[in-house]
Amino acid sequence: MTDPKKTHPSDTDIRPHTFDGIQEFNHRLPNWWLFTLYGAVVFWLCYWSYYQWFHEGPDDRHRIQAELVQVEAAKLAAMASSHLDNASLWAMSRNPVIVASGRKTFEANCTPCHLASLRGRSENKLAIGPDLTVRIWIHGGHPIDLYHTVTQGVPAKGMPTWGPILGPRRITEAVAYVLSHHQEGEPIIDAATLPPGSK
Amino acid sequence: MPPAHHPNRDTVTTIREDGSRRFLYPADVRGRFSLARRISALLLIAVYALLPWIPVGGYPAVFLDVAARRFHLFGLTLAAQDIWLLFFLITGLGFLLFIVTALFGRLWCGWACPQTVFLDHVYRRIERWVEGDGVQRRTLADAPWGPGKIARAAVKHAAYIVVSLGIAHLFLAYYVSIPALWAMMTGAPGRHWAAFVFIALATGVVYFNFAWFREQLCIIICPYGRLQSVLTDDHTLIIGYDAARGEPRGPAGAHAAGDCIACDRCVRVCPTGIDIRQGLQMECIGCAACVDACDEVMAHTGRPPGLVRYDSLAGLARKPKRIWRPRLAIYSVLLLFGATAATWGVLSIHPVLLTAIRLTGAPYYLDQGIVRNQYLVRLVNKQNSPATVRLDVSGLRPGASARGVEDAIEVPPMGEELRPLIIEQSRSTYQGPFAFRVHAADPAEGVDVGLSLEFLGPATAGSYP
């Protein structure tokens, strides 16, 4: 190849080190490049002072705490917006729209054990789940108990913990569907209050 | 008119001794490569501009729907679960680029890179229309500010900003689709701050890059340019100067002079400000402007073209040329591995995803003389049409039965459904844990996916030897 210019002014400006026979010029970096470097230095100074020196900005712990508070607030808001108590669950069980979507959730998730008729073992001795239409309730005698039973499950007997799977809205609807097979004011007996062996 | 500064191999032309920028004003160039490059660039720009508009299978040809985590590529829809394919796509493109580079040098840079395509065929065209050719542009730049210069600068930069806005909007269209983009363009910025700020920043970056930064990106920032020295060798096609034919330089007709008449046309047309006659340099983006420039001069002086030409270093040195080299074999094998894996991956993507987990609670239940296992089956429909899926269980031991597989399951488009699956076996037939399979099938959509599950129960005399 052709010779590079031998008498360039920079030829005198060669860095002292040599690696594998390679030497380096000591040319100036482009000004725009230096500008980004100095800009980064200024940014670092501001950033570091803001967070580490003056502690003006929130640190990670505070940020996580703030987010946890928000998550908690959202949870509470979701609970408060549905006003879950016995009266509201009864009211929902008379609302055809809620009962219809509750029925969908029930049929997708609950029928393998409780059967589509809700009658479980009363209909078929080999069914897994108990009858949900009778007036003797196994886990508490109030609609809100039913909601908690679905949400938390009865792991010992095989009732799954549906809370994390279905979420509060679909569980509420499914409970409303089950309650639609009952009447508010009907005498519901909590099985735990019955004398043993009287079933 | 000679160039204001003669390039050398020890310094970067566009960086002055004091670190300030030496701006380049490349001269006009005509010729076969310039024409071919213009045509291919316009085609590439058309592809970039049209892809979001062309519907394939109900979605734009390329629609990277980040918000819904669905990636539509020419009718193939990938879900977030298929993201691992990206590895093979990126490495595949990488090895393809290796092969192209080993064979043809910086073909990508000069012909297909968006930086070159937009800079040479859009922004520099605007500059040419508004400010004239290279000499006029340099004269204008050196002239003091006056009404004429201000007017030209205003027109040029306004046009730059309009084009940059277009490029940025099209870029966003690949991620949100044209209708959503149009809705955002016609709506108030306050309703979609994120998109508005993105467009503003992207337009700013594109404008800065093409109006001011230009070749600095190729010379100083682009890693591909820096990788050249390990990807190319003496048999790679590059743009080079035939020193044996051209030297010694001298005016046409001079005694004992070579073919180079030292007109410096090749230097004045170079968009990165190098002298190709000083050999292969890192700054060269292979745009072939110097080839066309020199061929034109050779034609004027009645000499054959090709003093500056596409050739390998071996070819320029009159040594035997070789196309097939070990590095090509290595790159090809690596590409083949990746392409095979990617093809297998794409073919094995099922439109329906089936997973199953054990329901919370005990691993098994003993109830009324029956061993019971409870699972939760999850079906995800990755298609944009509903799927009617039937679950089926096979491989159960005698005496075992399944509940929850009786009815067909409607899975909405892009939706998911959960179903409990319960397997029971009477203790009288139970002989220990066993594995069985769950299948999800939708014959209408050609879906048939399966997975293996374990049925657990109490230990029996023979089950744990």
Image (spheres, coloured by chain):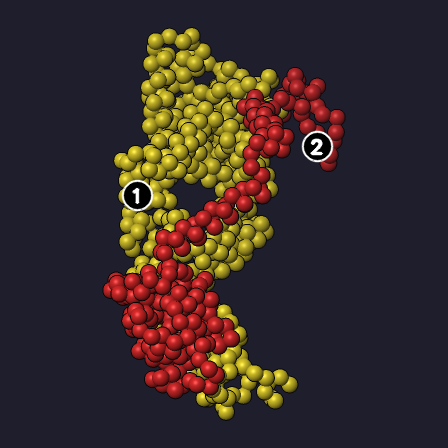
Which picture quadrant has residue A61? Answer: top right
- The answer to whether B112 appears left or right of A101 in the picture is right
Which mark is drawn over residue B367? none
Name the element at disc 2: loop
Give the vertical position of B293 relative to B198 (above or below).
above
What residue type is disc 1 on? Ala
Q: Position of residue A131 (x, y in %)?
A: 37, 79
Q: Which residue is mark 1?
A: B180
Front residue (pair B124, A133): A133
Name the element at disc 1: helix
Asked whether residue B32 is in view, the answer is no
Asked whether residue A36 is in view, the answer is yes
- The answer to whether B453 appears left or right of B406 in the picture is right
Q: Position of residue A4 (x, y in %)?
A: 62, 24
Front residue (pair B82, B47): B82
Which chain is red in the rendering? A
Which picture quadrant has residue B411? Answer: bottom left
Q: Which residue is mark 2?
A: A22
Report the residue that reaches farthest toward the bottom. B428
What residue type is disc 2 on? Ile
Q: Residues within 10 Å of mark 1 (few under 14, many from 20)?
A: few
CA distance separating discs 1 and 2: 55 Å
Which chain is yellow in the rendering? B
Foreground label between 1 and 2:
1
Query: In which chain is the residue bearing label 1?
Result: B
- Residue at 39% from the left image edge and 26% from the top image edge: B124
Which picture quadrant has residue B27? Answer: top left
Position of the C terminus of chain B by quadrant: bottom right
